[in-house]
Amino acid sequence: MADTTAGEVSETSRSAVGRKGVLDVAARLFREQGYGSVSLRKIAAAAGIKAGSIYYHFGSKDEIVVAILDAGIRAVHDNMRKAVGALPADTGAEAALRAAIGAHLRALLDVSDYSSANVRIFGQVPQYVRDANLPTRRAYEAEWDSLLSRLQQDGALKRNVDIRRLRLMLIGALNATLEWFDPERGSADALSRTYADVFLHGILQEKET
Amino acid sequence: MADTTAGEVSETSRSAVGRKGVLDVAARLFREQGYGSVSLRKIAAAAGIKAGSIYYHFGSKDEIVVAILDAGIRAVHDNMRKAVGALPADTGAEAALRAAIGAHLRALLDVSDYSSANVRIFGQVPQYVRDANLPTRRAYEAEWDSLLSRLQQDGALKRNVDIRRLRLMLIGALNATLEWFDPERGSADALSRTYADVFLHGILQEKET
DNA sequence: ACACCTAACTAACAACTGTTATGTAATTGG
DNA sequence: CCAATTACATAACAGTTGTTAGTTAGGTGT
C-alpha cells in the first residue's frame, strides 16, 4: 500500500480491466513471446480493450515495461526473503543458501509471470529501461552477496572464490532454466535441490563413501 | 566448401560486400542488440549497402537468421570437437569435460559472433526459425551427452543424476555468462576453469585437507 | 563487340508500430 | 440531480518494418 499515488482506487466498478489488469496481461505476454514481438495492440487485445485506452493508465509502452521489470525483481526478492526469514534462528548459512535457491527458482518457474518476464526480456529492452530497473536489481543482488558472504565467513567456502562471480554464476544458471524447464519432467522444487547439490558439492563422486 | 549451391563464387570483383559480408555484419548486430531491434535497413547500413540489395543474397530476413543460428552452433560444435579431439588418447573423461567447457565458453565469449548471436536471439525468433535450427542443435547436444555418459560409465558421477538435465544445467550456466561477462575482470579461459571446478567439485570446502 | 552475369541501386507497397486528440458511457460525490 | 471523474472507444498521425519490381554499373566469357 501507499504506492505511487494510490489509495483511492475504489474497485467497485465492475468489468474494469484497470492498470493491474493491463500489467498482468502484459507480463504474461512478455514472458511467453519476448519484448519485441509484443505490441501495445496485442496487450490491449489480450486484456479486452483497445490500444489507445492503455494510455489512460500508462504514459508510454516503456512505462509498462519498467513497471513489470521492477515488480518482477520485487516478487523474487520477497519470495527469497520470506523463505530465508522463515528459517529457525540457528539455521546455518548452507541451509539458508539452499532455501534461497529454492525460492528464486520457484518464483521464476511457478509463482510470478513478472519475475519470469523480467528474466526473459531484460536483455531485449532499450538501455534506459534497463537503467531504470537497476536500483531494484542491486538490492536483490546485495541480499545474495550477504548470504554468500555469511557462508564465506563461516569458513565453509573454498579460498579464492569471488563472491560477485559466484553470485553471477549461480543466478545465471538458475535463470537459464526458464528456457528449458518442463514441469512434466519434475517440479521446480526438486530441480532447485539438484541445483543446490551440484553447486555445493559438484557432480563427481567422493573418494571414499 | 561444397555448401548449398556454392562453388562458382569467384571473389575477383573488388569491394563487393557479398553474402558472407552481410552475414558477418548481421551476426554482430544480433549479438549486440538482439533480434527485434535489428532491422534489414540497419544490417544494410552497417554493411555499406541498401536494404533492397539484401534480397539478392537472401530470400527473407528469417533466412538470414536461420543461416546465423546454424553457423553459430557449428562454430561452438567445431571448437568443442577440436579441443576434445586434440587431447592425448589416454585422457580421462573428466579432463575431456574440462576441455569441452573451455571450448564452449571461449567460442561464446572470444571467438564467434555467430555463436554468441545464437545464444542471444534464439529465444526471440519466430518458432519455425527455431525449428529450422533444431537438427543442428541436437547434434551438438548429443556430443555433450556422450561426454557426460563417458563420465558416468567410468563410475565418476554420483548416482541419481540425469544426463540430460546435467547437460541443460551446464550449458545453460555457460550461456548465461554472455549477459555479464567482462573481459577486463578476467579471461574467458580462466572463467571456464572456475566453472569446471564448481561444477565438478562444488563450492564447499572439503572436510579434511 | 556482344551478350551475360553479378551485385548492387531506387522507389514504392501494405502492414504494423507507438502515440495523440477527441468523444462517450457509466459511475460517483456533493 | 447535476457535475465530475473513471475507464474506456474511435480514428488518425508519422514513422518503421519486411518485401517487391524494375533499373543500372561493372566485370567475364566468347
Image: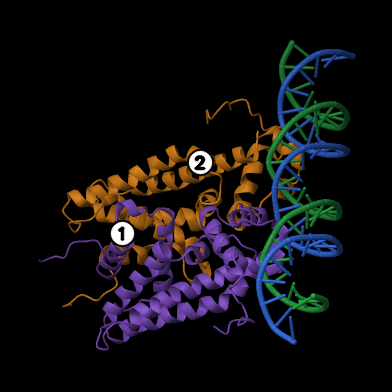
Chain colours: A purple, B orange, C blue, D green
**Residue reaching furthest to the left:** A209
Going by the numbered disc 2, the residue's amino acid type is: Asp
Q: Residue at x 40, y 58 (%)?
A: A177
Residue A187, numbered label: 1
* Disc 1 residue type (three-letter): Ser
Q: Secondary structure at mark 1?
A: loop
Q: Quadrant of residue A15?
A: bottom right
Q: Which residue is mark 2?
A: B70
Q: Residues within 10 Å of mark 1 (few under 14, many from 20)?
A: some
| Label 2: how many Cα within 10 Å (few below 14, some 14–19, many 20+) | some
Percent of width and height locating residue A125: 61, 62
Of residues B77 and B67, the one nearer the viewer is B67
Label 1 is found on which chain of the structure? Answer: A
Decide which of B197, A71 is in the foreground and name it.
A71
Q: Position of residue B117 (x, y in %)?
A: 55, 51
- Read off the chain for label 2: B
